[in-house]
Image (cartoon, rainbow, N blue to C red):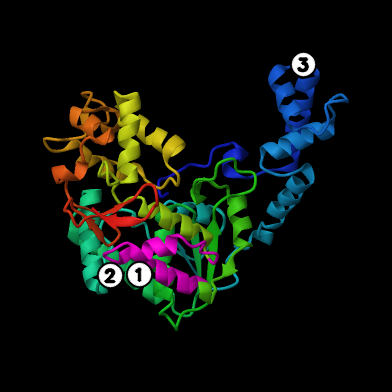
């Protein structure tokens, strides 16, 4: 997910643990339990090995470690020592030993890497491949088509966007020659699709330098990992120490995934998504999530549309911001939509004579504070009585597959997970 997430003070979020802080938390927890403070007693009772003896400091330490996601206090202490040892010595930059190009999917990762002391060139490829057309076509045509889509999404001049896309491609081609290239990517489908595109590109590049990968699905001590930008500089340095050389199997899988995503039919994507993709486990999950954007045969809605409409039906009238937050926190199996992307998903549902949702804006308030409610037509679609595709909504894309409401339109069978034509 590419939306900015600041690094707040809680190590549950940013992952910067210290032995002193964890020891203090354990002693405070034990003190609270011995004073019969109910929350402290319950936390300790849930984590201790035996209920027979009084609470001890070992019980409190174990509880704190388990709450942070570690099996025991020793494992947590080992991780904290690794964090401390990952810091560059004497002010040296982590990547200062070799000319380096860092590639990432989120624009807001650049200042975080700079804060962590990285000095190499950083190039962000924040193109939301989860939305819009991704067709298997010559590169100039592909860039032109993506530029027009991005211009509509961002409400910018398309020629300006086209120049930016060309500049990124030129910088990527030039900077990668003979330099170490490090890919920083997280687990969401947005980042994984960009990673597939890069691996596809690098699989055809014989002039590049070393290619390394930092792929992050979870971080010890972080209760809910969402994106790399939430992590403290210490933790980014720790991840740097765990980068791995990209293997031939990973390059091959990335190429196969990109070809499947950009095809005009879902068969290759379906077959690839059914495998474990052991070379890139996170990519398999992202492909399965991407496939779920094909419309449901009964409602005609993709998963993002369906989840959003269901939330409005359950809780409406509800603000757009409320729907977005609930979608990310409670419903979305693999969160990836930024607020801007979510607005794009909502837009067709609000338009036309048979709109699924109606929007009520409060004068003088931001757009995302306006209220959403389900229309009569929307209730018909969510109940399966009507099909959204019958109203011929604006064409949307699932990779290279157009969703246009025709009888040849691809859908996904909910019971089997297998694509089929409508």
Where is mark 2, residue-wise?
A: 136
Q: For numbered disc 1, what is the local secondary structure? A: helix
CA separation, marks 1 and 2? 7 Å
CA separation, marks 2 and 3? 65 Å
Where is mark 3, residue-wise?
A: 36
| Image quadrant in which you'd find residue 268 | bottom left
Q: Is residue 124 visible?
A: no
Residue shown at 77% from the left, 37% from the top: 62
> Which disc, if any, is residue 259?
1
Q: Are marks 1 and 2 in contact (CB under 8 Å)?
A: yes
Q: For numbered disc 3, what is the local secondary structure? A: loop
Counting other residues with Cα less than 10 Å from the Cα at mark 2, is it few (<14), some (14-19), or many (20 or more)? some
Q: Is residue 19 left or right of residue 108?
A: right
Residue stretch rendered in magenta on the structure: 250-279
Residue shown at 29% from the left, 32% from the top: 368
Q: Is residue 218 left or right of residue 261?
A: right
């Amino acid at each position: 997910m590419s939306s900015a997430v600041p690094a707040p003070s809680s190590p549950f979020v940013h992952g910067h643990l210290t032995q002193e802080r964890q020891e203090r938390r354990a002693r405070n927890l034990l003190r609270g339990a011995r004073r019969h403070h109910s929350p402290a007693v319950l936390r300790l009772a849930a984590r201790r090995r035996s209920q027979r003896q009084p609470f001890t400091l070992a019980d409190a330490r174990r509880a704190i470690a388990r709450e942070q996601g570690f099996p025991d206090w020793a494992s947590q202490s080992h991780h904290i020592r690794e964090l401390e040892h990952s810091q560059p010595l004497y002010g040296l930059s982590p990547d200062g030993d070799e000319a380096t190009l860092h590639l990432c999917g989120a624009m807001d990762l650049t200042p975080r890497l700079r804060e962590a002391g990285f000095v190499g060139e950083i190039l962000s490829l924040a193109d939301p491949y989860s939305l819009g057309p991704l067709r298997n076509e010559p590169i100039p045509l592909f860039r032109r088509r993506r530029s027009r889509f991005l211009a509509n999404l961002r409400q910018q001049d398309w020629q300006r966007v086209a120049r930016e896309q060309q500049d990124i491609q030129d910088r990527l081609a030039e900077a990668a020659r003979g330099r170490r290239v490090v890919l920083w990517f997280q687990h969401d489908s947005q980042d994984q699709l960009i990673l597939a595109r890069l691996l596809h590109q690098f699989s055809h590049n014989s002039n590049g330098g070393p290619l390394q990968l930092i792929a992050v699905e979870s971080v010890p001590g972080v209760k809910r990992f969402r994106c790399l930008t939430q992590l403290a500089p210490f933790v980014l340095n720790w991840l740097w120490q765990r980068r791995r050389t990209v293997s031939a199997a990973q390059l091959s899988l990335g190429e196969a995934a990109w070809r499947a995503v950009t095809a005009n039919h879902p068969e290759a994507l379906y077959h690839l998504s059914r495998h474990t993709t052991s070379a890139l486990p996170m990519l398999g999950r992202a492909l399965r999530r991407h496939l779920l954007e094909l419309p449901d045969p009964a409602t005609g809605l993709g998963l993002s549309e369906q989840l959003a409409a269901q939330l409005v039906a359950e809780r409406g009238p509800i603000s757009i911001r409320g729907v977005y937050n609930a979608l990310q926190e409670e419903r979305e199996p693999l969160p990836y939509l930024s607020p801007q992307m979510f607005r794009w998903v909502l837009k067709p549902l609000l338009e036309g004579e048979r709109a699924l949702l109606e929007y009520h804006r409060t004068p003088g308030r931001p757009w995302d504070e306006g209220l959403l409610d389900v229309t009569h037509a929307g209730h018909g679609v969510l109940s399966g009585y009507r099909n959204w595709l019958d109203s011929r909504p604006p064409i949307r894309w699932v990779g290279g597959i157009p969703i246009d409401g025709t009888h040849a339109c691809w859908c996904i069978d909910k019971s089997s997970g297998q694509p089929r034509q409508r």
